[in-house]
Amino acid sequence: MAAPESAPESARDADTDDRQLAPAPDSVPFSDLALAAYCPRQLYYARRDDTDRSPPPVHETARALAGQYDALAVASDAALATYDLAVEPPEFRSNLAVSRDRHDVSSPAETAVFLRGKDAHGRAAKVHHDPLAPSLVTPGSPPEAGVWEPQAVRATAAAKALSWREQTRVDHAFVEYARHGVVRRVDLTTRKKAAYRRALRTARGIDGPPPRIHDDAKCGACEYREECGTKTRTLGSLLSFGDG
């Protein structure tokens, strides 16, 4: 994968602490950590089959929107209607106004950044300086509050990898639900870091099919559900499924 687009000199300097250039040999992709938090058994099947987990085109749509918040904030309803939004223009504009008041993510110092930490690696859509924080962009829907747990795990992994790169503390990250105009901050609390460590142990420890989770919403949407053997009640349960 490509190096960070505009990494600071401290990250490129050959004299920098070797730990920045020598991650653990069992470094785990951010995507594996998120899937381990969502469903370890699904991660097992994805690895076994070497499944192509390239993001669908809607992810590119979300990333494009996340780079245009300033313009979108003042766009008319007619202009917003030309974009692939997940909500109606008035709701998008209202969401974006609230998010922009709370979080400054419109002018990142770096974009499309590959981060390699001690234990995990992957790409962040943005990296913000002063204070340091990564942003992850998703095309999915936000929960009522906070972020979905797999996304919190992934955001924590990105923040820890950024901390490793810069050799300084990073205490939060952002998840941007760009098609909704919603930005949520993820603080690296004790609970969040514990969930990250659980996902890391799970991802590293899988060497056979983990136990089934028996979750109708998750299992009903899983491409491995027939092979896995998990029975779901109805497809109606999928109506509440959120992006993980």
Image: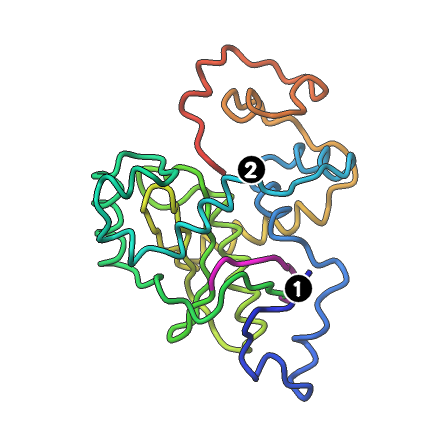
Dots 2 and 1: beta carbons under 8 Å?
Answer: no
Q: Against 212, is 60 above or below? A: below
Q: Which residue is drawn at 64% across and 26% down?
A: 212
**Identity of the residue furthest to the top in this view:** 234
Q: Which one is in front in this view, the residue at disc 2 or the one at disc 1?
A: 1
Asked which secondary structure carries label 2, the reply is helix
> From the viewer's perspective, is 173 left or right of 40?
left
In the picture provided, is 13 more to the left or to the right than 103? right
Q: Nearer the viewer, residue 193 or 169?
A: 169
Residue 116 in the image: above or below residue 217: below
The residue carrying mark 2 is 38
Q: What stretch is highlighted in magenta?
A: 117-126
- Residue 2 image label: 1
**Which x, y percent locates residue 135?**
45, 58
Residue located 53% across and 58% down the image: 124
Query: Within the image, what quadrant is residue 114 found in?
Result: bottom right
Disc sitting over residue 34 in the figure: none
Question: Is residue 19 a member of the stretch shown in magenta?
Answer: no
Q: Farthest residue toward the bottom?
A: 15
Query: Which color scheme does this rendered protein use?
Result: rainbow
Amino acid type, mark 1: Ala
**Real-space Cα separation, disc 2 to disc 1, in angstroms:** 27 Å
Q: Give the quadrant of the N terminus.
A: bottom right
Q: Position of residue 27 (x, y in %)?
A: 70, 59
Horizontal side of 39 relative to 172 (left or right) equals right
Can you give x and y, in whole percent of width and height, for residue 81 in the image?
30, 37
Quarter of the rendering containing residue 220: top right
Label 2 Cα neighbours within 10 Å, binned few <14 / some 14-19 / many ≥20: many
Q: For the residue marked with disc 2, what is the amino acid?
A: Tyr
Is 25 above or below relative to 163? above
The prevailing secondary structure element of the residues shown in magenta is strand
**In this picture, residue 181 sits left or right of residue 220:** left
